[in-house]
Amino acid sequence: MASLPSFLTPLPNRPNKGAYLNAVYHHPAPLGPAHCIYWPPKKPDVPPETVVIFIPGNPGLLDFYTPFLNALYEKDATENLAIIAQTHIDHTPGVYKDTNPHSRHSLTSQVHSAIEAFDATVAEFRTSKVVVIGHSVGAWITLQVLKERPNLISGIFLLFPTIAHIADTPNAKKLSNFFKPVPRRFIARFSHVGRHMPVWLLHRIVGMEWPISQVKVIRELTKSPSSIRATLRMGHEEMLQIREPDVALLHEHRDRLWFYFAEHDDWVGKQKEYIINKLKPEAGSLRITYGDPKIPHAFSLNYGEEVAQQCHQWLLQMNLTTTR
C-alpha cells in the first residue's frame, strides 16, 4: 500500500477513495491542521519526477476537486507523477474543532499555510520538479508562493485566476456584504438550517446542474459553523487585499506561467482584459488558454476532465510527463 509523505498523517475519519489518500498537515501554531489529499506515484518505491501542488479556491473544499485531480493523475503515463492538494486552514468540516481561533481564517494565514506546505513538499521530494496549480483565489495564493520561493518552482498554472481587483467583479459586488463581520456571524449561527435540509431540496436550491456528490459537499459544510466563518472571513479579506496585480512578478516569471480563463466569469469580470493588457502578450512567451464557453468559474462541478486535459497538455509542454 502506498505511504504518505513524512509531513502528512492519515485522516481516519475520511475514507480513502481510489488512488488518493486523505491526510492532515499539522502546521505549527498558530495555524494548526489542514486537510490534504495525496496521490502517490503509480510506480512504487521510486521518487516522483514531478510533484503537483494544488491550491483550491474559496471555499477550499478538496472534495469539490477530486474529479479534476483524479483525471489529471490518470492522464499521466510516466507513473512518476505525485499530486498533493491542501485546503485552506479551517475550511474542511469534520477535521477541526469549532474552537479554532479566528486568526487562522485570514488570507495572510492561508498564504503562510501554502508556503509551509510548499516548503515541506520540496524538502520531502528534493529531486522532483514542482508545479503549483491554483484555482480562483488559489491562483493569487500561488503567486505569493512564487514570490517567496521563485527558484524552486518549475511551473505555475493559474485556473480562472482572481488576481486583480476582486472587489470590482460582478459577483463580488453582489455578494461582498455577506462576507462582512456581522452577516457572516449570522450565516454561521443559522447554518443548522441547512444541515437538516434534505439533499434533494438543497440540490434544487444550489442548482440542478450540480452533481449530487457535490451537493453533499455543500451539505457537509453547513454542519460546521467554524468552517463557514473561515470561508466568509477569508472572502472578506480577499475583497480588501487583492487589488492591483503584481505586474513585475508576472513579467519576471512569465516563462513559467500558464493562464486558463473562462469566456464568461463573474468572479473575474473585466479584470481578465486588464490583466492581459498589463502583461503585454505581444511581448511573447505568454501562455493563455480561453476555455470552452460552457465551462464556468466553478469548473470542478462538471468539467474537471476538460480542465485536467488542458493541465496535462501544459505538463507535456514542460516535458514533465508523457501522453497516454
Image (cartoon, helix red, strand yellow):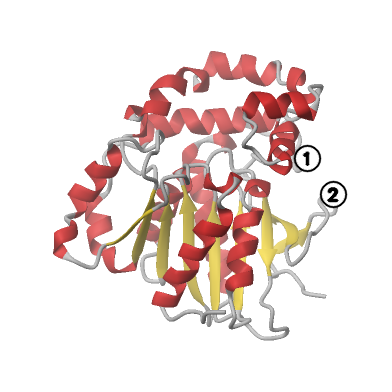
Q: Quadrant of residue 169?
A: top left
Do we see residue 235 in this rendering?
A: yes
The amino acid marked with disc number 1 is: Gly
- Is residue 199 toward the left or the right of residue 142 in the image? right
Residue 97 vertical position relative to residue 118 in the rendered view, above or below? above
Q: Residue at x 34, y 67 (%)?
A: 256
Which numbered circle lies on residue 277?
none
Is 211 or 85 nearer to us in this picture? 211
Residue at the outermost bottom position: 46
Q: Position of residue 293 (x, y in %)?
A: 41, 46
Q: Position of residue 131 (x, y in %)?
A: 47, 68
Mark 2 and 1 residues: CB-CB less than 8 Å, in contact? yes
Marks 2 and 1, Cα distance to the nearest angstrom? 8 Å
Q: Position of residue 127 (x, y in %)?
A: 53, 82
Q: Residue at x 74, y 22 (%)?
A: 194
- Is residue 244 toward the left or the right of residue 308 in the image? left
Residue 67 vertical position relative to residue 235 in the rendered view, above or below? below
- The residue beneath circle 2 is 13
